[in-house]
Amino acid sequence: MLELLVVIAILILLLMLLLPAGGHSIEASRRMNCSNNLKQLALAIHNYHDTFRSFPAAIGGTKLPDDPMASNVGRLSGMVDLLPFLEQRNLHDQIRQPYSDSGKEFPAMGPAPWIADYPPWKLELDLLHCRSAERKEKNELGQTNYAFCIGDRTRNLHTSRVDLPQDTRRGVFGADRTIRFQNITDGTSNTIMLGEIGNREKTLIVGQYVTMSSGRLLENPSRSAQFRLRDNSPYYADKFTLSDFGRGGRWADGSAGDSQFNTILPPNSPSCVVAAKEAGDGLYSLSGFHIKGAQVALADGSVRFIPEDIDCGDLTLPTPTQEELSQIGFESPYGVWGALGTANGGEVIGEY
């Protein structure tokens, strides 16, 4: 009997030792898959640039008529433009043509990306899914775990270029502006192009953002710590109203909450939209379900893991104004993380 108990104890001990190793192995596999997704997306952007001599816009589309069933109201994500370069040409061709379904008529380039009756917007594209994001909450529309980097820009994120007289390109992406490789004067190996975002999972910070927040947050991003349930908590406090869809809740939507992130707050920090429910200015953080950080693709196509403790400079300083954004060589105040987001800030980037 004693021998049997000893054997059982040894087996239990071995099982306890193997379980964490198995868990780490699964996460390592998921992280590798996520890295491969980012590499394929980066390659698609390079191929797009080879074809059109510029990067796609993070947000754009047909703006008229201003009816969400008659046009996409200028809210399409750049992911739609990348479809032919992601082995999804048939889907892109379907979106480009007027379409009828169940008695409903949809325009070429689709209706607004929140229209759930339009079949392409409901699709879950495997390449846009990080396997560490389990997507436990059901969503009417297809989701994405990858977003465009807009540098340390927080203002006029959805404003058309015709409404902004100054050139406010900051990151590789920004509103409906497009740039070329030649505009990345900081170097392609020093400039982020794409990165991870989480998806809605109750009040977890990595997949959600606070709505109707104060514009004062743009003057002092460190105030975003108030959104946490408590210090270093991975959850939002219950008193704040969160988005109905969460981060990446609509793969075809170019709005900042769905498809953009800025390099100000460190990875897995709170996100918020200012004075709006969605599609407004704000702080939108890189985020994901990997341990202690998230992954990005640089403009040279390589993938790097960004730790939560990356240098973010002085987070009490205000985010750049439109005038500052238009100045080539204006250094980001947000340390190494901010510098990695700018395409032409002229910063010297240290170790990270």
Image (spheres, rainbow, N blue to C red):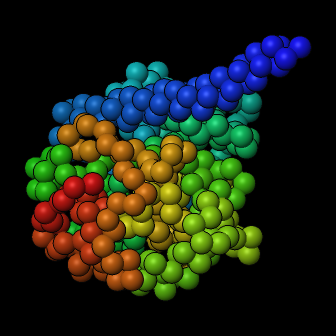
Residue 335, image quadrant? bottom left
| Horizontal and vertical percent position of residue 342 | 24, 61
Which corner quadrant holds the N terminus?
top right
189 vs 306, nearest the viewer: 306
Q: Is residue 212 left or right of residue 12?
A: left
**What residue is drawn where x is 44% and y is 47%?**
294
User: In the rendered view, would you say 295 is above or below 258?
Assistant: above
Q: Is residue 218 left or right of residue 53?
A: right
| Horizontal and vertical percent position of residue 237 | 69, 70
| Horizontal and vertical percent position of residue 76 | 47, 48
Which corner quadrant holds the C terminus?
bottom left
**What residue is drawn where x is 74% and y is 70%?**
238
Residue 341, image quadrant? bottom left
Whether residue 110 is visible: no
| Horizontal and vertical percent position of residue 258 | 53, 52
User: In the rendered view, would you say 263 is above or below 207?
Assistant: below
151 vs 74, nearest the viewer: 151
User: In the rendered view, would you say 57 is above or below 104?
Assistant: below
